[in-house]
Image: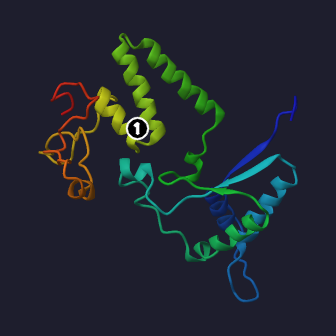
């Protein structure tokens, strides 16, 4: 701490595991279990640990498709399946990390090397967003930049992102509905059935296009 910078080692676990598996000849335990990847990964991990960094974190690929698979379905289509002798060693490598108290992180939709965001990447992105905001010619365009980043931060989920969109129509350029005739945009939500049936003064909304009291935008404000 203080004036001494801290050191963190971020390890792309799957990359290292594949490297040592193919670099080290077959090894087995007395019971015949393959161990060359376990040995090689642990050896390299201990080498890094002996350097006494302040932190060690291992990134780990998840089984779900990544954003690359979504953008390009043929990504890795011609690669062979991982060897069975390697796959069976993965749980034991995770046990090694657990025993050494080294955190293992994974992010759905990302491979380990792409899940790590370096400080330089963050700075570049912040600079890019600020440049977009400064270059926006109108207050409406500036609001769109802010709204876009807000949606990114929320991953598009949550009532706040919905409220922002129905109040401002931002971010603009949202993906069109997959249904060719989706009907009116939901400007409000239906009352719960229990509320309507138990309250004689309650009246269910005619449809989801009915606007809430604070929504003063035109009827076709959002398509």
Task: State which quarter of the image contains the N terminus.
Answer: top right
Q: Nearer the viewer, residue 68 or 130?
A: 130
Most extreme residue toward the top is 137
Q: Nearer the viewer, residue 51 or 158?
A: 158
Residue 15 location, x and y as percent? 62, 56
Residue 41 location, x and y as percent? 73, 63
Q: How many marks?
A: 1
Q: Does the image show residue 100?
A: yes
The scheme the figure's colours follow is: rainbow
For image coordinates 36% across by 32% down, the residue present is 164
Task: State which quarter of the image contains the C terminus.
Answer: top left
Most extreme residue toward the front is 200
Question: On the rendered structure, is 87 left or right of 38?
Answer: left
Q: Nearer the viewer, residue 177 or 73?
A: 177
Q: Nearer the viewer, residue 78 or 11?
A: 11
The residue carrying mark 1 is: 160
For image coordinates 46% across by 13% down, the residue present is 134
State whether residue 29 is above or below residue 128: below
Please tell me how crowded label 1 is: few (under 14), some (14-19), or many (20+) other residues with Cα within 10 Å.
few
State whether residue 212 is above or below residue 27: above
State whether residue 18 is above or below residue 122: below
Residue 33 location, x and y as percent? 68, 83
Determine the secondary structure under disc 1: helix
Q: Does the image show residue 172?
A: no
The image quarter containing residue 157 is: top left
Question: On the rendered structure, is 217 left or right of 37?
Answer: left
For image coordinates 31% across by 26% down, the residue present is 168
The image quarter containing residue 170 is: top left
Residue 36 location, x and y as percent? 71, 72
For image coordinates 83% across by 34% down, the residue present is 5
């Amino acid at each position: 701490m203080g004036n001494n910078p801290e050191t963190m080692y971020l390890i792309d676990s799957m990359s290292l595991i594949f490297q040592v598996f193919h670099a080290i000849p077959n090894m087995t335990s007395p019971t015949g279990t393959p161990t060359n990847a376990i040995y090689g990964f642990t050896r390299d991990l201990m080498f890094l640990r002996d350097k006494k960094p302040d932190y060690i974190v291992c990134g780990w690929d998840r089984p779900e498709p990544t954003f690359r698979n979504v953008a390009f379905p043929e990504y890795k289509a011609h690669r062979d399946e991982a060897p069975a002798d390697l796959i069976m060693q993965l749980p034991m490598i995770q046990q090694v990390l657990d025993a050494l108290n080294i955190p293992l992180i994974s992010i759905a939709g990302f491979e380990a090397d792409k899940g790590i965001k370096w400080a330089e990447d963050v700075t570049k992105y912040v600079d890019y967003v600020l440049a977009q905001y400064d270059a926006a010619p109108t207050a409406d365009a500036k609001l769109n930049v802010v709204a876009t980043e807000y949606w990114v931060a929320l991953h598009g989920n949550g009532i706040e992102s919905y409220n922002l969109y129905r109040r401002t129509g931002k971010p603009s350029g949202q993906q069109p509905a997959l249904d060719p005739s989706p009907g009116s945009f939901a400007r409000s939500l239906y009352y719960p059935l229990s509320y309507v049936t138990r309250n004689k003064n309650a009246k269910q909304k005619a449809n989801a296009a009915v606007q809430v009291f604070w929504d003063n935008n035109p009827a076709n404000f959002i398509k």
